[in-house]
Amino acid sequence: TVTYPHNWSIIGSAGIEDNDADIVTFLSPTQNDNAVVDIHQDKPTNGNSDIGTYLSSTISLYKNNLQDVKVIGSNTNSSLAGNKAYKLIYTYTTSDGFKMKDMEIGTIIGNKAYYIVYDGKESLFDNYLPIVQNMIDSFKVTVTNNQRWIEIIVADIKSLSQNYFSIDDDTTW
């Protein structure tokens, strides 16, 4: 589950790329701010099943695929959904010259990685950080009938309306 502010927009899954499923995306109310929160489920490759190795692979991936990546900080002593997690904060430049700042926090449960990415313009990043941190703090992974499910109950704080997104842990990619 994850709780989000009522004035943020929701976009459903963008699909699966390689082993990575984009479950849901949240957009800030002011679209020009480019503040986006993505929740993903990934199937780590062999050798990436511990937090430290997964974090190192993630940093390498971003350095190889994004422009001007600068790691501001990273650690493996964070927490997500009550589990040991990694946190990565970095900047990069988009192809159209915008300086972006990202914060990613992720955990591995069983054979799946669950991670949340907050992406925003570097100059506005701190403006949305408290809201995003509340979203991250509300994130939970539910275990049902001995199967791991990620069930995101997207609860609109103001109206308490709910949308449900789920991915069965047994999904084969």
Image: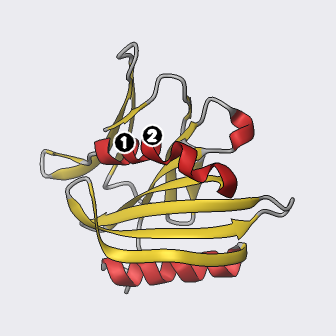
Q: Residue at 23% across / 52% down in the picture?
A: 148
The image shows residue 108 at horizontal and vertical percentages of 30, 67
Q: Residues within 10 Å of mark 2 (few under 14, many from 20)?
A: some
Q: What is the x, y in percent for residue 129?
A: 49, 48
Q: CA distance from mark 2 to mark 1?
A: 5 Å
Secondary structure of the residue carrying tag 2 is helix
Specify whether 66 is left or right of 48: right
Residue located farthest toward the right when viewing the structure as drawn: 96
Q: Callout 1, which amino acid?
A: Asn
Can residue 92 be seen in the rendering of this structure? yes
Name which residue lies at 43% across and 44% down.
130
Query: Who is closer to the viewer here, 168 or 76?
Result: 76
Is there any visible trace of residue 49 in the rendered image?
A: no
Q: Which quadrant is the N terminus positioned in?
A: top left
Labels 2 and 1 touching (C-beta < 8 A): yes
Q: Is residue 161 left or right of residue 94?
A: left
Position of residue 124 in the picture relative to residue 32 (left or right): left
The residue carrying mark 1 is 134
Q: Which residue is denoted by mark 2 in the rendering?
A: 131
The quadrant where residue 169 appears: bottom left
Q: Amino acid at mark 2?
A: Ile
* Residue 47 vertical placement versus 22 (above, below): below
> Looking at the picture, does residue 73 appear above or below residue 99?
below
Residue 77 is tagged as none
Render colour scheme: secondary structure
Q: Position of residue 120 (x, y in %)?
A: 63, 51
